[in-house]
Image (cartoon, rainbow, N blue to C red):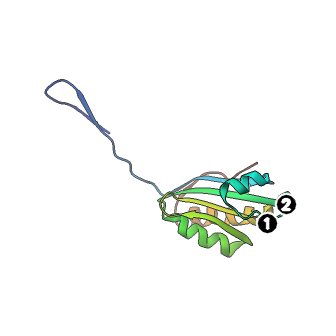
Amino acid sequence: MDGSQNNSGQMRIVQELVAGKEITLAHIIGGPLPIVYQKLGLNPEIDYRTSAIGIMNLTPPESAVIASDIAVKSGDVYLGFADRFSGTLIITGEIAEVTSSIQEIVDYFRDTLGYVTCPITKR
């Protein structure tokens, strides 16, 4: 951030946003209620009692493409949403499968790509 004053004494501030390489959210929702699936437009034909939703946010946002590939290759999960413009990824499946996929993504991004990662949270 740079601050300078103009001729009238007003402060002018210039801000720059530099996206880092990071995973800022990695959360697993265990046993979500059916209304959550419906409102998100996810597959409503699943067994809600043993299911989970995994949600992640990554920067740069194109990282969601790589994370999507890892998710579907590392577990029996359904790719509910992947957005290369916002960096959001949502996967669904059995709790163990979603947990495994999220862990694989975090491990790969941290250990191979050098990303800063947040802890995986679960509720």
- Residue occupying image coordinates x 74% and y 53%: 29
Q: Amino acid at mark 2?
A: Thr
Counting labels gives 2
Whether 48 is drawn above or below 1: the answer is below
Question: Which mark identifies residue 35?
Answer: none
Q: Is residue 71 left or right of residue 45?
A: left
Residue farthest to the top? Answer: 9
Query: In this orientation, which residue lies closer to the viewer: 6 or 90?
Result: 90
Q: Nearer the viewer, mark 1 or mark 2?
A: 1
Separation of residues labelled 1 and 2 (CA atoms): 13 Å
**Residue 22 x %, y %:** 52, 56
Q: Is residue 15 left or right of residue 80?
A: left
Q: Amino acid at mark 1?
A: Glu
- Residue occupying image coordinates x 60% and y 69%: 68
Q: Point out the tag, 1 or 2, that comes first from the N-terminus.
A: 1
Q: Quadrant of residue 50?
A: bottom right
Query: Circle 1 sits in a helix, a strand or a loop, which is it?
Result: loop
- Local crowd size for mark 1, using a 10 Å CA cut-off: few (<14), some (14–19), many (≥20): few
Q: Is residue 7 left or right of residue 117?
A: left
Query: In this orientation, which residue lies closer to the viewer: 42 or 64?
Result: 42
- Local crowd size for mark 2, using a 10 Å CA cut-off: few (<14), some (14–19), many (≥20): few
**Residue 84 x %, y %:** 50, 64
For label 2, the residue is 50
**Residue 41 x %, y %:** 67, 60
For label 1, the residue is 45
Please say if the residues under marks 1 and 2 sit with CB atoms less than 8 Å apart: no
Residue farthest to the bottom? Answer: 73
- Residue occupying image coordinates x 69% and y 62%: 42
